[in-house]
Structures are given as C-alpha cells and as structure tokens.
Amino acid sequence: MREAIALRPDDGAAGVVAEVHKDRHSWRGTSGDLVTGKRISPDAHFRIGSISKPMEAVILLQLSAEGRVDLDRSVQHYLPGLLPEDRFTEPVSVRQLLNHTSGLPQDFEGAPAPSRDEEIERRFDYLTFDEVIRQTLHPEGRSGPGPRFRPGTRQEYNSFGYRVAGKLIEEITGHPYQYEVTTRILKPLKMRETKAAAPGRSTPVPRPYLPGYLPGSTGGVVDVNVQGGLPASMTSTTGDLDRFITGLFDGRLLRPGQAAELFAVPKGADGAPLPYADGSLCNTGPARGTACFSVGLMSVPLPDGSVLWGKTGSDPGYRSGVFASRDLNRRAVYALGTAAFPRDGAPAVAQRLAVAAFGN
C-alpha cells in the first residue's frame, strides 16, 4: 500500500493521504508534498467535494422517517414554482433527486466552459443553493435548459439535483444546511475534524492540511487551499470520513427502512436496473451501462464478486473517496491534492490503492 500511494509523474497529484481497514487490521499512509517537499500529516484535512452528497441524502432520509417529507412526492409539491412549468411538465420526486434519475439539467448547463485561469479565480466564490438554482434554470443571456430525459427512465449522475435537495432541506427544517448536517451527523458521530463551509465567504482548509494545486496559464502551480464553495462544501480527514461511513452502515444514523435505500439501485418496471445515461460510467462486465448509484451512494464491484459502497468527491485541487463493504470489514478512505487539472475517471492512485488493499 505504501507503493500504491507513492506518486508517479503521470498521476497529476502533489500529495496523498489514505486509510484502510481490512479484517480488523488498519493502515494509514501519506506521501510527501511534491511541490514543497514538506511532510504531509496522516491527520491532514482536505476538501471532500461530493462526499457531502450522502450526508444530504441521510438528512432527507431522517426527515422521511420523521414524517416530514415523502420521498415519492414531487419537488413541485414541496417547492412550488422552483421548476418552470413550461419546461418541466412531469413531476420529479425527492427520491429521484437522490438516486440521480430526475432528468434535471446539470449545474449551469449551457454556460461557456471557464478557462483554467477563470476556474482558479472562481474558487473564491461562495454560492447559495438558491443562486445555483437560479443561475442554472434562469441564466442571463440564453434560454434556460429543460429535462435531459423523462424522470425515472434512466440514471445520470447529477449534482444539480442535490442543490435542489439542499434547498428542500432548508425549506422543510427552517434551518441552514450547515446547522442540520452538524446536529444530525457531525455531532452524533463525533466528527470533530469535519466542518461545513462558512456561509458567504472563502476560508482555508484547517491545519494540518493536504495541499492542493492547480496549474496557471503562465506556468507554475497555484495553491488553492482557500475556497468559497456551496453550503454543502466541507473539509474533513480520513479518520472522520471513516467514522461517517461506519456510523452510516452500523445503524447509528438511519432506521432499517431508510438504511435499505442506501443499497438499492433504481429499477425499471421489468425489475432490472435502469440504464445509465451514457452507458459507460457505471459498472463493468455484464452489468456495464446499468445504474450503480443508490440514494446517496455508489456501488463498486470487486474482483472477488463482493461490492463496496461509498462516494467520491472533487473540489478544485482535491479528489477524494470513502468506500466500505456492508459488513464494514473492508473500508478505505483516500484524498489527493492535485498538481494538474484532473482527468475523467478514478485517480490512478485510488485504483492502485484499491488493488493493493482489496485485490486479493
């Protein structure tokens, strides 16, 4: 595993921190910061990106258990007027937001792609759920997007659905998202090293931190430790993310009926998993091209036929992931600070770590 996280020139990474648990044995490791040569602490903090999505899903599943939201009722019912009726004529359920079958547009769909320098500069921006929703559905200077497909007919990973879910959490509870995630998840699981983004401003990753860099157009790399983000943006550590997935799977956060949603991919009327929209992201082998996301999580098959469940995340300068078997005998958390703009697919470091930890 030390060899697996040893960085190679084509990894596009500046540093790595990882934690693995298997059959009651534990291992933690780090690489050094290739840019500065400094040591990276095993307790380093990093930005977790979309690993916050399972936390959003947990909050709505808890609200479901409390009778405050029905996962099969529509967004149009709970947030009337949010989806323009002239474009979104079919109901989109809360469950479809969470399992990526809503067919809603992607964040800022149709907007010109930012240059690399613009992406680096925009890291300081902080956007509320309302601002993302408005800029996506009602963009200035161009027509707003419509559905990508009919709700419930296929699966396509969709971050915008989780912006709507975040808005729904705030509407139902009357509290900011940061309050709900802290009181419902972080405090009960004693995730003391995990923090939600400070509303309305940019903040640094707490020390000790895993450095993340992006290359500027004039040469060299820019430390992107300070960022704004979204209400669901968070920083954490490998230890805290291991606490999260352990508490999620062992029943401390959800009742059995709601926990079952974590391990069920959406199916069609024929009982088969729905097709995945582009036919490539999800699964391998005979199941290739079928749904692999549940409510909040992603399934990853291993060579021995077992399955890990978890989530990856990406923020400017950072890529991360947390996965576990349902019995929690196998768990892994990793984060890398980038030194290049990330390529599609799982980072090479994460693939090597998975093979080293669970390949046999």
Image (tube, grey):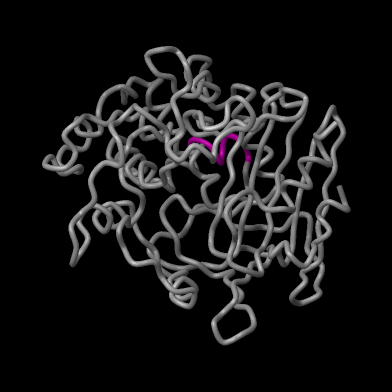
Query: Where residue 229 appears, x then y in whole percent?
Result: 44, 60
In the image, residue 17 sits, relative to residue 21, either above or below, namely: below
> For residue 30, what is the image quadrant?
bottom right
Residue located farthest toward the top when viewing the structure as drawn: 270
> For residue 318, what is the image quadrant?
bottom right
Q: Left or right of 100: which side holds 234?
A: right
Q: How many marks?
A: 0
Q: Is residue 195 visible?
A: no
Residue drawn 49% across and 34% down? 296
Front residue (pair 276, 68): 276
In the image, residue 151 sits, relative to residue 242, either above or below, namely: above
Query: Where residue 103 appears, x then y in whole percent?
Result: 32, 37
Front residue (pair 193, 78): 78
Q: Is residue 290 visible?
A: yes
Q: Left or right of 31: which side holds 292?
A: left
Query: Where residue 86 appears, x then y in whole percent?
Result: 11, 42
Query: Where residue 3 appears, x then y in whole percent?
Result: 88, 53
Q: What span is colored magenta in the figure?
A: 184-190
Residue located farthest toward the bottom when viewing the structure as drawn: 218
Can you say which quadrant of the picture contains the C terminus? top right
Residue drawn 36% across and 43% down? 166
In the image, residue 216 sits, relative to residue 34, either above or below, namely: below
Residue drawn 36% across and 53% down? 107
- In reply to whether residue 106 is colored magenta, the answer given is no
Residue drawn 64% across and 49% down? 346
Front residue (pair 307, 222): 307
